[in-house]
Image (spheres, rainbow, N blue to C red):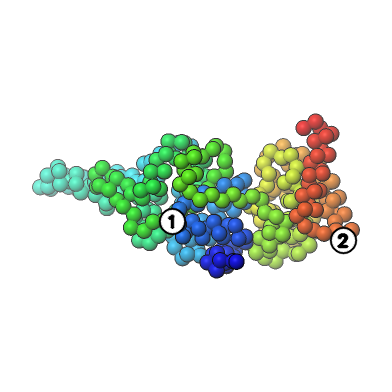
Amino acid sequence: MANPEVQRIQQMLEEQGYITDRSIATSIYLAMRLGKPLLVEGPAGVGKTEIAKVMASALKTDLIRLQCYEGLDATTALYEWNYQRQLLYLKMEEHSDRSVEEKEATIFSEPFLLKRPLLQAITHHRAPVLLIDELDRADQEFESFLLEVLSDWQITIPEIGTIKATHIPYVVITSNRTRELSDALRRRCLYLWIDYPSFEKELAIVHTKVPGLEERLARQICGFMQIVRRLHLEKVPGIAETLDWAAALLALHRDHLDQATIEETLGVIFKHQEDAQQMKSKWLGPVLQELRALEEGGGEWNQSALVEIGQRLGARRSSTTGI
């Protein structure tokens, strides 16, 4: 029996333009209900980050984003002291009668504190959505520190003391799996894997995000993407590339796919020169041929048919090149 709360979450997300399914809605609902972080993994460009954005919009709360990168440390993620303001204050107080201890207590107080994402989330006036984006890019040492914060929801600042969260944030952690996250972090979270969308779901997303696109062109775009994701590519295009391509073709006033149009816009879909070159010289003709056969033969445009075409073309290419 369908849970009405899960249905409500799914409806809230779709009202924000995020086409989802019950598994995603259920994961979000349980993360909110149980107060646990939601770890979302999957290929790049499938809508992991978008989950946090639409959650914030649906809940009418603020989104606080911590973008992870190699070398990110606790200080950058937590807080820094506003050194310029501290120096200015000390300059202004040079001739005052206040003691050194009093001046020190003032400059190391909250008005001189620059709150970074984690401290912002802990001290927020209401529960925000905290997006910890691409955690796999950060070092393991930062991951261990983050685990402490997620467990206690408090931060100790030596000059001020311990600050505890008054409202526990909703936490979404994303990873592209460039490195494996620790078991300790995984146990702390609920887990959600988002894969490339099916043809039907991708078509619905395109119609939602790129209004005004011709139905025939939308189907051709989504069919094309479903097929090329089964080929041997350096970087498989995600839904983000699908939407960029759909918007580009709409801007170019195209109403259907042809070889010249695709060749002119390969840079929207493929971000590696090798992929674009392989597509242009080896696969473009056969893919267009298959799409044309589907249209002219009245074949069914569905996930299984398109996957079969992609696998067949990929296997044919592998056998001729020895890949």
x, y percent for residue 192: 56, 51
Name the residue located 52 percent from the left edge and 45 percent from the top edge.
Answer: 134
The residue identified by callout 1 is 35
- List x then y, in percent, for residue 25: 56, 60
The kind of residue tagged 1 is Gly
Q: Position of residue 17 (x, y in %)?
A: 59, 64
Horizontal side of residue 112 vs 283, given as left or right: left
Q: Are marks 2 and 1 in contact (CB under 8 Å)?
A: no
Residue 126, quarter of the rendered image: bottom left
Residue 16, x across and y down, in percent: 56, 65
Work out whether residue 220 or residue 181 is closer to the camera in this orientation and state it.
181
Residue in the image at 85% along x and 56% along y: 294
Instruction: Let me know if residue 9 appears in the view.
Output: yes
Screen quadrant of the N terminus: bottom right
**Is residue 261 among what the camera can see?**
no
Name above or below for residue 295 compared with residue 314. Answer: below
Tell me the residue at 47%/51% (across/down): 37
Frontmost of labels 2 and 1 is 1
Q: Answer with the quarter of the image where residue 144 lies.
A: top left
Of the image marks 2 and 1, the number of the one nearer the N terminus = 1
Please identify the residue farthest to the left as the structure is shown. Answer: 97
Q: Secondary structure at mark 1?
A: loop
The image quadrant where one finds the C terminus is top right
- Judging by the rendered image, the residue that carries numbered circle 2 is 298
Q: Name the one closer to the observer, 234 or 34.
A: 34
- Whether residue 171 sits left or right of residue 107 in the image: it is right
Residue placed farthest to the top in the image? Answer: 322
Q: Residue at x 39, y 47 (%)?
A: 151
